[in-house]
Image (cartoon, rainbow, N blue to C red):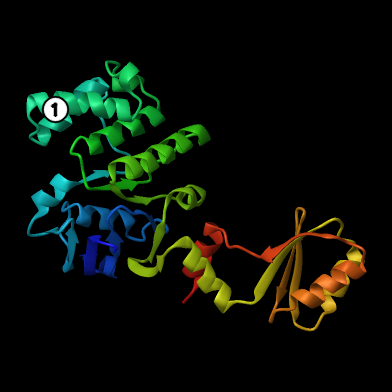
Amino acid sequence: MSEPIIQTHELTKTYGQFTAVNHLDITVNKGEVVGLLGQNGSGKTTTFLMLMGLSLPTSGTATVAGYDVVQNSKAVRTVSGLLPDGAGYYEDLSAKQNLNYIGQLNDIPKLEREKRITEMLDVVGLTKVCDKKVEQFSRGMKQRLGIAEVLMKRPKVAFFDEPTIGLDPQGTKDIRDLLLKLNKEQGITIVLSSHLLHDVQQTCQKLLIIREGKLIAADTIENLSNTLLSREDLVIEFELTKTPAELLRELSTINGVTEVNQENHRLYVQMSSNLAREVSETITKHKSTILLMKPKEYSLEEIFLRYYEED
Protein backbone atom coordinates (compact mmCIF):
# COMPACT_ATOMS: atom_id res chain seq x y z
CA MET A 1 0.00 0.00 0.00
CA SER A 2 1.30 3.45 -0.94
CA GLU A 3 2.43 5.61 1.95
CA PRO A 4 2.33 9.40 1.42
CA ILE A 5 5.55 11.17 2.38
CA ILE A 6 4.70 14.62 0.94
CA GLN A 7 1.22 16.10 1.13
CA THR A 8 -0.06 19.60 0.50
CA HIS A 9 -3.56 21.02 0.92
CA GLU A 10 -4.43 24.28 -0.84
CA LEU A 11 -0.79 25.38 -0.47
CA THR A 12 -0.58 29.01 -1.56
CA LYS A 13 2.16 31.64 -1.79
CA THR A 14 1.54 35.23 -2.81
CA TYR A 15 3.88 38.16 -3.21
CA GLY A 16 1.72 41.28 -3.11
CA GLN A 17 -0.74 40.93 -5.98
CA PHE A 18 1.21 38.06 -7.57
CA THR A 19 0.27 34.47 -6.79
CA ALA A 20 3.27 32.18 -7.24
CA VAL A 21 1.61 28.98 -5.96
CA ASN A 22 -2.16 28.71 -6.08
CA HIS A 23 -4.07 26.25 -3.83
CA LEU A 24 -1.73 23.37 -4.64
CA ASP A 25 -2.89 19.87 -3.66
CA ILE A 26 -0.24 17.22 -4.27
CA THR A 27 0.67 13.82 -2.86
CA VAL A 28 4.01 12.07 -3.29
CA ASN A 29 4.34 8.53 -1.99
CA LYS A 30 7.34 7.11 -0.18
CA GLY A 31 10.03 5.84 -2.54
CA GLU A 32 8.72 7.54 -5.69
CA VAL A 33 10.72 9.53 -8.21
CA VAL A 34 8.46 12.39 -9.25
CA GLY A 35 8.91 15.09 -11.88
CA LEU A 36 7.60 18.59 -11.17
CA LEU A 37 7.06 20.23 -14.55
CA GLY A 38 6.11 23.74 -15.56
CA GLN A 39 7.34 26.68 -17.56
CA ASN A 40 9.56 29.36 -16.05
CA GLY A 41 7.60 31.25 -13.40
CA SER A 42 5.06 28.46 -12.90
CA GLY A 43 5.90 28.09 -9.18
CA LYS A 44 8.26 25.09 -9.10
CA THR A 45 11.08 26.68 -7.10
CA THR A 46 8.64 28.42 -4.72
CA THR A 47 6.99 25.04 -4.08
CA PHE A 48 10.37 23.48 -3.27
CA LEU A 49 11.23 26.28 -0.86
CA MET A 50 7.93 25.93 1.00
CA LEU A 51 8.28 22.14 1.19
CA MET A 52 11.74 22.61 2.71
CA GLY A 53 10.40 25.01 5.33
CA LEU A 54 12.51 27.81 3.86
CA SER A 55 9.59 29.98 2.75
CA LEU A 56 6.35 30.45 4.69
CA PRO A 57 3.11 29.68 2.84
CA THR A 58 0.58 32.48 2.66
CA SER A 59 -2.13 29.90 3.31
CA GLY A 60 -2.73 26.18 3.13
CA THR A 61 -0.71 23.37 4.67
CA ALA A 62 2.05 20.93 3.76
CA THR A 63 3.76 18.03 5.48
CA VAL A 64 7.02 16.27 4.63
CA ALA A 65 7.69 12.89 6.26
CA GLY A 66 4.91 13.69 8.72
CA TYR A 67 6.28 17.10 9.76
CA ASP A 68 4.36 20.31 9.18
CA VAL A 69 6.51 22.68 7.09
CA VAL A 70 5.56 25.67 9.26
CA GLN A 71 5.24 24.27 12.77
CA ASN A 72 8.13 21.80 12.42
CA SER A 73 10.32 23.45 9.78
CA LYS A 74 13.58 22.46 11.47
CA ALA A 75 12.51 18.82 11.56
CA VAL A 76 11.54 19.05 7.89
CA ARG A 77 15.05 20.24 7.02
CA THR A 78 16.48 17.35 9.04
CA VAL A 79 14.70 14.71 6.96
CA SER A 80 14.88 16.43 3.56
CA GLY A 81 17.47 18.10 1.37
CA LEU A 82 17.40 20.55 -1.54
CA LEU A 83 19.83 21.05 -4.42
CA PRO A 84 18.73 24.43 -5.79
CA ASP A 85 19.22 25.62 -9.34
CA GLY A 86 22.55 27.43 -9.48
CA ALA A 87 23.73 26.10 -6.11
CA GLY A 88 26.77 27.90 -4.72
CA TYR A 89 29.90 26.31 -3.27
CA TYR A 90 32.97 27.53 -1.42
CA GLU A 91 35.24 27.58 -4.45
CA ASP A 92 38.47 28.00 -2.47
CA LEU A 93 37.73 24.89 -0.39
CA SER A 94 38.08 21.27 -1.44
CA ALA A 95 35.15 18.91 -1.92
CA LYS A 96 35.95 17.28 1.39
CA GLN A 97 36.08 20.66 3.17
CA ASN A 98 32.74 21.71 1.65
CA LEU A 99 31.11 18.53 2.92
CA ASN A 100 32.70 18.96 6.34
CA TYR A 101 31.20 22.44 6.58
CA ILE A 102 27.76 21.14 5.59
CA GLY A 103 28.09 18.45 8.24
CA GLN A 104 28.93 21.05 10.87
CA LEU A 105 25.93 23.17 9.89
CA ASN A 106 23.74 20.11 10.42
CA ASP A 107 25.27 19.34 13.83
CA ILE A 108 26.66 15.99 12.74
CA PRO A 109 29.28 14.81 15.28
CA LYS A 110 32.90 14.76 14.08
CA LEU A 111 33.42 10.99 13.81
CA GLU A 112 30.07 10.44 12.12
CA ARG A 113 30.74 13.45 9.89
CA GLU A 114 34.06 12.02 8.69
CA LYS A 115 32.43 8.66 8.02
CA ARG A 116 29.64 10.23 5.98
CA ILE A 117 32.05 12.43 3.99
CA THR A 118 34.02 9.37 2.90
CA GLU A 119 30.83 7.50 2.07
CA MET A 120 29.18 10.33 0.13
CA LEU A 121 32.29 11.14 -1.89
CA ASP A 122 32.32 7.49 -2.95
CA VAL A 123 28.59 7.48 -3.76
CA VAL A 124 28.89 10.47 -6.12
CA GLY A 125 32.24 9.43 -7.59
CA LEU A 126 34.44 12.25 -6.26
CA THR A 127 36.80 10.28 -4.01
CA LYS A 128 39.82 10.75 -6.30
CA VAL A 129 39.37 14.53 -6.43
CA CYS A 130 38.20 15.05 -2.84
CA ASP A 131 41.18 17.29 -1.96
CA LYS A 132 40.99 19.39 -5.13
CA LYS A 133 39.59 22.92 -4.80
CA VAL A 134 36.06 23.24 -6.13
CA GLU A 135 37.10 26.17 -8.37
CA GLN A 136 38.85 23.54 -10.51
CA PHE A 137 35.71 21.41 -10.87
CA SER A 138 33.61 21.10 -14.00
CA ARG A 139 29.90 21.87 -13.73
CA GLY A 140 29.13 18.17 -13.66
CA MET A 141 31.54 17.63 -10.76
CA LYS A 142 29.95 20.53 -8.89
CA GLN A 143 26.51 18.97 -9.37
CA ARG A 144 27.85 15.73 -7.94
CA LEU A 145 29.20 17.65 -4.96
CA GLY A 146 25.80 19.29 -4.52
CA ILE A 147 24.14 15.88 -4.44
CA ALA A 148 26.71 14.74 -1.87
CA GLU A 149 25.83 17.78 0.28
CA VAL A 150 22.15 16.82 0.13
CA LEU A 151 23.03 13.25 1.12
CA MET A 152 25.10 14.28 4.15
CA LYS A 153 21.87 14.44 6.18
CA ARG A 154 20.79 10.96 5.05
CA PRO A 155 17.47 12.47 3.94
CA LYS A 156 14.23 10.63 3.43
CA VAL A 157 13.24 13.15 0.74
CA ALA A 158 15.45 15.01 -1.74
CA PHE A 159 14.41 17.93 -3.96
CA PHE A 160 16.46 18.66 -7.07
CA ASP A 161 15.83 21.90 -8.98
CA GLU A 162 17.17 21.54 -12.56
CA PRO A 163 19.95 19.11 -11.53
CA THR A 164 21.25 18.56 -15.08
CA ILE A 165 21.01 22.09 -16.50
CA GLY A 166 24.14 23.11 -18.39
CA LEU A 167 25.59 19.61 -18.51
CA ASP A 168 26.72 17.77 -21.63
CA PRO A 169 24.84 14.58 -22.62
CA GLN A 170 27.22 12.28 -20.74
CA GLY A 171 27.10 14.47 -17.61
CA THR A 172 23.31 14.52 -17.82
CA LYS A 173 23.16 10.73 -18.06
CA ASP A 174 25.59 10.34 -15.14
CA ILE A 175 23.45 12.53 -12.86
CA ARG A 176 20.26 10.80 -13.96
CA ASP A 177 21.77 7.38 -13.27
CA LEU A 178 23.03 8.57 -9.88
CA LEU A 179 19.58 9.78 -8.82
CA LEU A 180 18.01 6.47 -9.84
CA LYS A 181 20.70 4.60 -7.91
CA LEU A 182 20.03 6.66 -4.78
CA ASN A 183 16.32 5.97 -5.07
CA LYS A 184 16.77 2.26 -5.62
CA GLU A 185 19.56 1.54 -3.14
CA GLN A 186 18.81 4.05 -0.38
CA GLY A 187 15.05 4.38 -0.82
CA ILE A 188 15.20 8.18 -1.04
CA THR A 189 12.02 9.80 -2.34
CA ILE A 190 13.06 12.19 -5.11
CA VAL A 191 11.21 15.18 -6.53
CA LEU A 192 12.96 16.95 -9.39
CA SER A 193 12.21 19.74 -11.80
CA SER A 194 13.77 19.86 -15.23
CA HIS A 195 13.30 21.43 -18.65
CA LEU A 196 14.90 18.33 -20.20
CA LEU A 197 11.71 16.35 -20.71
CA HIS A 198 13.48 13.33 -22.19
CA ASP A 199 15.44 12.93 -18.96
CA VAL A 200 12.30 13.30 -16.88
CA GLN A 201 10.69 10.56 -18.98
CA GLN A 202 13.71 8.31 -18.37
CA THR A 203 13.81 9.03 -14.63
CA CYS A 204 10.38 9.73 -13.14
CA GLN A 205 7.53 7.37 -12.27
CA LYS A 206 4.96 10.14 -11.85
CA LEU A 207 4.46 13.71 -13.07
CA LEU A 208 3.08 16.81 -11.43
CA ILE A 209 2.41 19.52 -14.02
CA ILE A 210 1.79 23.04 -12.76
CA ARG A 211 0.80 26.18 -14.65
CA GLU A 212 0.70 29.61 -13.03
CA GLY A 213 1.00 27.97 -9.63
CA LYS A 214 -1.93 25.58 -10.18
CA LEU A 215 -1.75 21.82 -10.50
CA ILE A 216 -3.17 20.84 -13.89
CA ALA A 217 -2.17 17.16 -14.05
CA ALA A 218 -0.82 14.51 -11.69
CA ASP A 219 -0.33 10.89 -12.75
CA THR A 220 2.05 8.42 -14.37
CA ILE A 221 3.26 9.22 -17.89
CA GLU A 222 1.38 6.16 -19.19
CA ASN A 223 -1.92 7.24 -17.60
CA LEU A 224 -1.56 10.83 -18.81
CA SER A 225 -0.91 9.52 -22.31
CA ASN A 226 -3.92 7.19 -22.16
CA THR A 227 -6.13 10.07 -20.99
CA LEU A 228 -5.10 12.11 -24.01
CA LEU A 229 -5.69 9.13 -26.31
CA SER A 230 -9.24 8.78 -24.96
CA ARG A 231 -9.97 12.44 -25.67
CA GLU A 232 -8.63 12.66 -29.21
CA ASP A 233 -8.94 10.89 -32.53
CA LEU A 234 -7.17 7.54 -32.73
CA VAL A 235 -3.75 7.76 -34.39
CA ILE A 236 -2.18 4.53 -35.67
CA GLU A 237 1.51 4.39 -36.44
CA PHE A 238 2.70 2.26 -39.38
CA GLU A 239 6.06 1.22 -40.72
CA LEU A 240 5.73 0.07 -44.34
CA THR A 241 8.04 -1.33 -46.99
CA LYS A 242 7.01 1.54 -49.24
CA THR A 243 4.69 4.55 -49.13
CA PRO A 244 3.85 5.64 -52.70
CA ALA A 245 2.09 8.98 -53.17
CA GLU A 246 -1.05 7.28 -54.53
CA LEU A 247 -1.34 5.27 -51.28
CA LEU A 248 -1.24 8.46 -49.20
CA ARG A 249 -3.89 10.05 -51.41
CA GLU A 250 -6.23 7.05 -51.17
CA LEU A 251 -5.83 6.77 -47.39
CA SER A 252 -6.92 10.41 -47.12
CA THR A 253 -10.15 9.64 -48.97
CA ILE A 254 -11.29 6.91 -46.54
CA ASN A 255 -14.41 8.11 -44.72
CA GLY A 256 -13.40 8.78 -41.09
CA VAL A 257 -9.69 9.30 -41.75
CA THR A 258 -9.02 12.86 -40.62
CA GLU A 259 -5.29 13.19 -41.28
CA VAL A 260 -2.39 11.30 -42.88
CA ASN A 261 1.20 12.27 -42.05
CA GLN A 262 4.54 10.79 -43.02
CA GLU A 263 7.48 11.43 -40.69
CA ASN A 264 10.85 9.87 -41.47
CA HIS A 265 10.06 6.20 -42.15
CA ARG A 266 6.78 6.14 -40.23
CA LEU A 267 3.23 6.78 -41.38
CA TYR A 268 0.64 8.20 -38.99
CA VAL A 269 -3.06 7.82 -39.82
CA GLN A 270 -5.52 9.76 -37.67
CA MET A 271 -9.12 8.54 -37.62
CA SER A 272 -12.35 9.44 -35.85
CA SER A 273 -13.13 5.74 -35.23
CA ASN A 274 -11.15 2.53 -35.44
CA LEU A 275 -10.61 2.05 -39.18
CA ALA A 276 -7.50 -0.12 -38.84
CA ARG A 277 -8.93 -2.85 -41.06
CA GLU A 278 -9.86 -0.49 -43.91
CA VAL A 279 -6.49 1.28 -43.71
CA SER A 280 -4.59 -2.04 -43.66
CA GLU A 281 -6.50 -3.35 -46.68
CA THR A 282 -5.75 -0.15 -48.59
CA ILE A 283 -2.04 -0.47 -47.79
CA THR A 284 -1.99 -4.09 -48.95
CA LYS A 285 -3.84 -3.15 -52.13
CA HIS A 286 -0.92 -0.85 -53.00
CA LYS A 287 1.47 -3.81 -52.61
CA SER A 288 3.12 -2.42 -49.48
CA THR A 289 3.89 -4.70 -46.52
CA ILE A 290 3.11 -3.61 -42.95
CA LEU A 291 6.23 -4.05 -40.80
CA LEU A 292 4.80 -2.33 -37.72
CA MET A 293 1.33 -1.22 -36.69
CA LYS A 294 0.44 0.23 -33.27
CA PRO A 295 -1.42 3.12 -31.65
CA LYS A 296 0.77 6.21 -31.49
CA GLU A 297 2.39 6.81 -28.12
CA TYR A 298 2.70 10.35 -26.82
CA SER A 299 6.15 11.63 -25.94
CA LEU A 300 6.46 13.52 -22.67
CA GLU A 301 6.92 16.72 -24.63
CA GLU A 302 3.60 16.16 -26.42
CA ILE A 303 1.87 15.33 -23.12
CA PHE A 304 3.28 18.43 -21.44
CA LEU A 305 2.33 20.78 -24.30
CA ARG A 306 -1.19 19.38 -24.66
CA TYR A 307 -1.97 19.75 -20.97
CA TYR A 308 -0.41 23.20 -20.94
CA GLU A 309 -2.47 24.35 -23.93
CA GLU A 310 -5.78 23.30 -22.37
CA ASP A 311 -8.00 25.98 -20.89
Query: Residue at 28% of width from left, 26% of height from top?
Result: 121
Left or right: 234 in relation to 151: right
Whether residue 85 can be seen here: no
- In this rendered view, identify the residue nearer to me: 183 or 150: 183
Residue 281, picture quadrant: bottom right
Up/down of 184 relative to 123, above or below = below
Residue on which disc 1 sits: 113
Left or right: 256 in relation to 169: right
Up/down of 173 relative to 206, above or below = above
Query: Residue at 38% of width from left, 37% of height from top?
Result: 178
Query: In x, y percent, where is residue 231?
Result: 56, 78
Whether residue 179 can be seen here: yes
Q: Secondary structure at mark 1?
A: helix
Amino acid residing under circle 1: Arg
Residue 13, picture quadrant: bottom left
- In this rendered view, identify the residue nearer to me: 48 or 229: 229
- In this rendered view, identify the residue nearer to me: 290 or 28: 290
